[in-house]
Image (cartoon, rainbow, N blue to C red):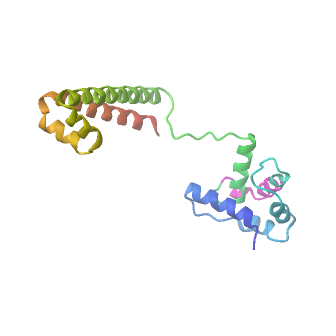
Amino acid sequence: MRGRWLQLLAWLGVLASGCTSTLDPAAEQACAEGSALYSKLYVNKWGDHTDPAFDQVLAVARQYPSSRGECGTLAGLADLIESARGHRKVTSSPYTTGPKFYFGLLLAIVGVIAALVSGIWLLIVVYQEGIIWLLLYLFVPVAGLVFVFLHWEVAKRPFLLNLAGGVVAAVGAFMMVK
């Protein structure tokens, strides 16, 4: 029974990050059952990041800098604790920066607005054909496409605008991520 709480949190970090690393053997030995750190961790609650036991975790993590920042290691857990305490901010972001981000955001907003307007427009066109078509359009998934194909002349402009808006929104969203 080795430092179960510590291992559990480290393994949760491994699962969250998709990594396969395990605890550093030296750090694992420092947290083994019977050690001073293990007894502090076993008694204290992990939910409170201000707990003094976390200072012990940070001290042990600093002893093994070779594993600093690797997922699933005690040092990786220390990074998480320091971040929760506000000592260190997480700076990585999945989004790009600069003009590419803002242009992508603009495209995404324009695409969503175009898709929304064309969706309402298509709903109005369906209503003009009859209440039965409107009910089918709203409650039967395939009925919308059937309506567009059967009434192509009146439905083609809102349908194509809806498709174009979706494509523009998707392009904008993909431009925003790295």
Of residues 156 and 147, which is closer to you in this image? 147
Is 1 placed above or below 39 here?
below
Q: Is residue 134 left or right of residue 149?
A: right
Q: Residue 125: give x, y in percent of width and height.
A: 21, 27
Which contiguous range is marked in magenta?
56-69
Is 49 placed above or below 165 here?
below
The residue drawn where x is 62% and y is 39% is: 91
Q: Is residue 123 left or right of residue 8?
A: left
Of residues 130 and 165, which is closer to you in this image? 130
Instruction: Tell me if residue 86 is in the magenta stretch.
Output: no
In the rendered image, the quadrant that contains the N terminus is: bottom right
Give the overall secondary structure of the magenta segment. helix
Q: Residue 153: give x, y in percent of width and height.
A: 12, 29
Of residues 135 and 6, which is closer to you in this image? 135
Is 68 placed above or below 4 here?
above
Q: Residue 145: give x, y in percent of width and height.
A: 20, 41
The residue drawn where x is 36% and y is 36% is: 170
Looking at the image, how many numbered discs can be counted on the residues? 0
Instruction: Tell me if residue 60 is in the magenta stretch.
Output: yes
Q: Is residue 161 left or right of residue 16?
A: left
Of residues 152 and 168, which is closer to you in this image? 152
Is 176 placed above or below 75 here?
above
The residue drawn where x is 87% and y is 65% is: 36
Q: Is residue 64 left or right of residue 70?
A: right
Question: Which residue lies most toward the bottom here?
Answer: 1
The residue drawn where x is 39% and y is 30% is: 108
Question: Which residue lies most toward the right here?
Answer: 36
Quarter assignment of residue 129: top left
Q: Residue 56: give x, y in percent of width and height.
A: 83, 56
